[in-house]
Structures are given as C-alpha cells and as structure tokens.
C-alpha cells in the first residue's frame, strides 16, 4: 500500500513537470572558424536562437584568443546587438570595432 501511494505521488509529480510551459529564452551563439596554418585569419559567425546565421565577419591579420575575457565580452556584445536587430546584418565591421574599443 505504501509503495502504491509513493508511485501515484511520483507519477503525478512527473506529469506535472512535463505539463509546465517552458519560457522561450532569446539567446544566440557565436562561432569562430579559423585554420591552424593561418591563425590570424578567422571568420566569426553569429547565430540566433533558431540557429540561423544573422551576421558573419571575416577578421584578417588578428588572432582571436577566445580564452581572454575581453574577447568574449566583445563578441557577446556584438551578439546582443545582432539579436536586437532581428535581421541579417550586412557589411558592418562590428567585431573589429568592438575589439578596438576595449
């Protein structure tokens, strides 16, 4: 009898968790594509929460070290700007500008 009550309570609790709505968090991500032979040339691509490309920029003659806090902060700020526009951004140097201002 005790196990039956515990099973019913746990089943009810489990169904309750599944029925809750998940809030849509508007987050995107950025990806840096580079080559070992040419580390100073890389492409930074920004994606929205649906994994659609919203901005891409080619960086030349500068090595991006993503382990540095300054670089991560600059890329996150550009991502935030790109997410606010909700359109594909064309022909802007947002990453280079953000890295130079820091």
Image: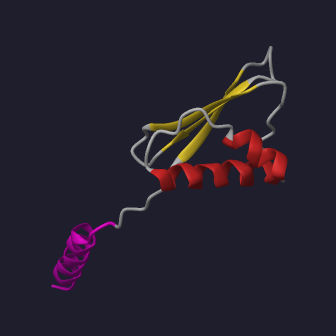
Does residue 101 appear in this view?
yes
Q: Position of residue 42 (x, y in %)?
A: 72, 26
Q: Using residue 33 as the reference point, say whether residue 19 is left or right of it.
A: left
Is 95 or 52 nearer to us in this picture? 95
- Colour mapping used in the image: secondary structure
Q: Residue at x 64, y 49 (%)?
A: 78
Q: Nearer the viewer, residue 62 or 72?
A: 62
From the viewer's perspective, tell me whether residue 57 is left or right of residue 59. left
Q: Nearer the viewer, residue 39 or 1?
A: 39
Tell me the quarter of the picture where residue 7 sits: bottom left
Which span is picked out in magenta?
1-22
Q: Is residue 42 left or right of residue 9?
A: right
Examine the rendering and report whether any part of residue 68 can be seen. Answer: no
Q: Position of residue 9 (x, y in %)?
A: 22, 81
Place of residue 61 in the rendered image (x, y in percent of width and height, measured from the top left): 84, 25
**Is the stretch drawn in magenta largely helix, strand or loop?**
helix
Give me the residue at 20% from left, 71% from top. Answer: 15
Quadrant of residue 43 in the image? top right
Observer-nearest of 29 and 6: 29
Q: Which residue appears at 21% of the width and 79% of the height?
A: 3
Q: How many marks?
A: 0
Image quarter in which the N terminus is found: bottom left
In the displayed structure, 74 sits above or below 9; it is: above
Is 60 within the magenta? no
Q: Residue furthest top?
A: 37
Q: Residue at x 27, y 69 (%)?
A: 21
Query: Within the image, what quadrant is residue 69 found in?
Result: bottom right
Q: Is residue 34 above or below residue 18?
A: above
């Amino acid at each position: 009898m005790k196990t039956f009550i515990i099973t019913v309570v746990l089943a009810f609790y489990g169904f309750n968790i599944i029925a809750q709505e998940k809030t849509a968090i508007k987050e995107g991500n950025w990806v840096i594509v580079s080559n070992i032979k040419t580390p100073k040339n890389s492409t930074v691509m920004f994606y929205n929460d649906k994994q659609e490309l919203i901005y891409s920029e080619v960086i030349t003659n500068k090595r991006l070290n993503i382990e540095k806090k300054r670089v991560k902060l600059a890329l996150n700020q550009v991502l935030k700007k790109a997410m606010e526009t909700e359109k594909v951004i064309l022909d802007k140097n947002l990453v280079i500008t953000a890295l130079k201002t820091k």
